[in-house]
Every structure is written in C-alpha cells, then in structure tokens.
Amino acid sequence: MRPPHVGLTLRIIAVLVVLGIAVFPLYWMFVTALTNNSELFADKARLVPDFSQFGVFIDALAEGKATTWLRNSLVIAAGTTVLSIGLGIPLGYALSRFSFRGKALVAVVLLFTQMLPEALMVVPLFALFRRFDLLDSLGGLILVNSAFVLPIVALILKGAIDGLPRELEESARVDGARPLTVLTRINVPLIAPSLAATAVIAFFHAWNEYVFAVTFIFTPGMQPASVGIANFIGELGTPIQTVMAVAFMFTAPAVVFYLFVQKYVVAGMTAGAVKG
Amino acid sequence: MTVLEQQQITGPRSGTRRRGSPLGSKWTPYFFLAPAALFILVFQVVPLAQEIFLSFTRTSLLNPTHSTWVGLDNFTRIFGDEDFRRTLLITLVYVVVCVVAAVGSGLAVALLLNKGFRGRGLARALVTIPWAAPGIAVALIAIWMLNPDYGIVNRFLDAVGLGVPGGAILDSPRYALPAVLATTIWQLFPFTSVVLLSALQSVPPHLTEAATMDGAGRWWTFRAVTWQVIKPTVGLLAVLMTIWSLRRFELIWLMTKGGPVGATETLVIDLYSQAFDSKQLGSAAAVGMVGVVISLIVIAGSRFVARAAEREAR
C-alpha cells in the first residue's frame, strides 16, 4: 500500500491541474488585453499581465462603442429578468398549488420548448416581429429572450414554492386574503434565494444571447455586446488588446454573479429539467 | 385534486362574494397561468407550428410569404443528399463525444472534489467559471488561443514538438472538430461536475464505510454503493448534454461557421446556413425538424429506460 501522503499529493496536483484548465482561458483573455504590441507578437509569449497597459480598458470604454453595446445588453438583460420573473412567478404558483384541466399539457410544453434551438425559431419569429414592428428594437429582444428563458424560470420557481409549507397561505386565505395577495405577500418573500437564482439565469441568458440579436437588430447603435464582440471575429481593424478588454468586461459580470448563486442555479436547473 | 373534487368541497357558487374557500374559484389557476401561457403560445408554439408547416413547403427567404406546398420533398431530398448525411454523422460524433466527455470528466472532477480538504469551497467555485462565461467570449478567446501565428496553443504544441503543420487548427478539416469539441467540453464540465458533486454528497457515508469495513476495494465500493446512488443523475445529465449539444449554435458558428468543408457542420449550423446563406426556408425547416425529432426520441427513450430501471429496482 502507498503511504497516505503520496495519495494526498497526487490529489492536490490533480486539483491544481483542473483549476488551471478551468481558469486559464479567461486569465489569458486578461493577459492578452494587458500586453503591449511588441510583446504580443514576440517569439516568446508574455505570461503575466502588464498592468502599465491598464489604460486599454479605459480607452475601450471612452471610445464609446463598447459602452453603448454594454448599455444595450444591460437594458435587454434587465428587461428580460423582470418580464420572465413577472410571468414565471404566477405560472410556477399555478403549477405548484393548483390542479386544473390542462396542467399536464402545460408541463409537457414547458419541457418541450426547452429543447427547441434558437436557430430553428429565428425564421418564424423574424416574420412575426416584422408584422408587429418589433424588429430593430431592444423591446423585441426582451420579449423573445423572456419567452425562451420562461420555462426554466417557471420550473425553478415551482420547485421553490413546492418546498414552502401550505399552512401559512391557507391561514391567510381563511382570513379572507385574495389569491394574488397570498402569492405576493406570503410566498414571494419566502422564495427569495430561488428568485435570486432565476434572476441571474434570466439576466445572463439575455446578456449572452446572440442569434436573435444578430438577426433582429440592424442599427449599429442598438447592438448588444454579444453581437458587437462577435463582429470582432474576422475583423482586423481593432487591436486584439481592445477586443480582449471588451470581451473581458462582458464576461466578468456573468462569472462574478454566477459564483454568488451557483448553488441555487445548479439545484434549480437540474430540478427544472428532471421533474418538470 | 381534480376540478370535480374541488367543486364538491366548495359547493355550488353563490352570487355573494367568495369567502373562506381555501382554494378560490376554479378559475384561479387559469388567472395565474394565463399571461405566461399566452406568451409561450405566441412566441414558441405558433412559430414552431409555422416552422413545421414550412418544412413541407418550398419557401425563399427573399419572398417568405409565398410558400409552395411540396409535401415530403424537402425530407426526401435532404436524406438523399450526401452532404446532409455527413452533417448527421458529424452531429452524432459531436453529441456522443460531448455527452461522454462532459459526463466523464465531470464525474472525475466531482470525485476529486468530494473529499474534504482546505480550500475546497474555493476550488469548487473556480471550477464553475467556464460554465458561467458567455459563449461569445469563449468562442473569441478560443479563436485567439488557436491563432496560427501567435496563439498560445500553437506555441505550446510547437514547444513540445506536437505542432500542427502551418498551425491553422480551425482551418484544418482534421483538427477543427476536435478543437470545437474541446472548447465545448471545457464549457460543459463545470456543470456536470457540480451537479455530480451534489449527487455524491447525498451518498450515505455509513454505506461506503460499511462496504470498506467488509473489505471491499475502492472500485468495488464505487460500483456497489456510489454508482447506484448517482446513476439517475448521470442519466439525467446524459439527456441534458444530448439536448444542449443538439441545439448548440453560437460557439460552433463563431469558431468555424461549420467549416472547413463541412467538417464541423452540425444540424443546427446546417439549418442556419440553409436559411440565411442558401435562403431556402423550407429545407432549413426540414433540417430543424430532424433535430427536434432526434431530441424527442432521446427524451422518450430516456424515460423508457428510467421506468424500466425503476421496475427492476422494485
């Protein structure tokens, strides 16, 4: 038998290798943003960030295009969060607490829509949006992103409401409170952690969304960051440091927020996918 | 509780204001349901129905309101097309490798993180990072890392003597798919490992201890105890990874656009280029339907297997 400390050392090395693989690409994005031109194209790669180059982040924002993209992304993501949660709470409540005709159908539709690729739906939605004059608008993207994230939001919130004791709301109902009041005053405050998780999921679903944004938006000033950054690919005019700086500023919020709520996000995503 | 039972409890509705009924009227659930249902109907169900209709027509992107009904022509044509059969094969390879590698590496990392050690919380958080990163940013950094001249991957491969001639990995019909797969798996393994880690933590410690006390080796303990507990989670993840891989678009599209010469063209990439490059909405929809049907078969199949396993367990 091996002495125990050999196993431990191997384990530590393995953990470090995994962490290196997980973190390296984003670290490399950061390092590339903070490397000056001569070192970037030198024979030997620079492996640590050069903080004297930090101005690249400020310049990228001051130049204005990136700021507009990020602002558009923020508007779309915030709108999607509010709308999908606003619709998802009552839907999750109905699925959790009531039996009604058609409930099984609703559950099947919620599972089924989760497997539809965006690229498949982009054509008919384009036609729909053209008819209702929703093309080239941030509002249109809020609508379509909400529709795509709503099933998972509703299923996570249903799971959260399933976990609440019924006694509280029953006593409130006996006291004459209306169903909507019971939901907003009693249930909603109790599922705050799940609400936070669904908010992060909905926000970054819209923040990351690309297919609809690139198809439905024509005016450069209306583009979200996902489209703006994707347009850097194959374009040679922008210095690679600026590209990486903008991409890093686009990525960092998603990573930071996911780290805060990852436990609830993972639990919610699996629960939503399993039970439905 | 069915509507009927509910009526029996609440009794016939009187004209006076409802009072004391713990469930409200039978319309209450529909009141909560209606806004979301309407929304999903307009933005998902109706467009899907239109897409199904389109798959039986010849329709051009340039004149989308004019469709000619062609029956099953689109389907017979794509299945007779050699390029489409290659797309199916590449989709199969892409999906199978994603599922096996994402679940396998996820399990390995989960087992690694399952033993308590100092800094485990931090390690677990850091491992999540790839999954949280937006697909666009991942594609961008992958392209830069794979840059033929200055990319760190090529510099590394050259240094260890494994360099690809010319270094243009994403332009090589041979290496493009492995590169796209590696990027995809890099983004997926955090999700599978965190999910499997929480499954591992629900393994009752006294069972593994008992197995070890009975003289079982590590491998036997894993198979007899741990694997039995996490099996449903592994199955669920396999289904999820299959569905996600069948619908993954932007990572592949931005890295290779399905090229070179179709080497990374999955169903979703094919459908998008049929619609927007070839402007053939009908055949694009038909390609999309093939993907949807495959997903449905996988879901139905997994339910069947899960039921069979449940029966066996009883």
Image (cartoon, rainbow, N blue to C red):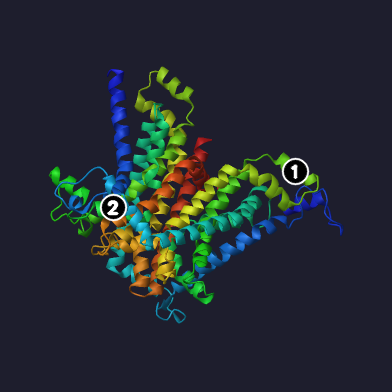
Residue at left offset 51%, top offset 67%? A140
Chain letter for the residue marked with disc 1 in the picture: A
- Is residue A26 visible to the viewer in this orientation of the structure? yes
Residue A220 in picture, x, y percent from top left: 40, 69
Q: Which mark is residue B142?
A: 2
User: Are the residues under marks 1 and 2 on the same chain?
Assistant: no
Is B110 above or below relative to B30? above
Residue at left offset 44%, top offset 40%? B195
- Asked if the residues shown at circle 1 and circle 2 are in contact, with their CB atoms under 8 angstroms apart, the answer is no
Residue A179 in picture, x, y percent from top left: 73, 51
Q: Nearer the viewer, residue A46 or A127?
A: A46
Q: Nearer the viewer, residue A76 or B302?
A: A76
Look at label 2 and name its amino acid.
Answer: Ala
Q: Which residue is mark 1?
A: A170
Q: Quadrant of the N terminus of chain A?
A: top left
Q: Nearer the viewer, residue B171 or B266?
A: B171
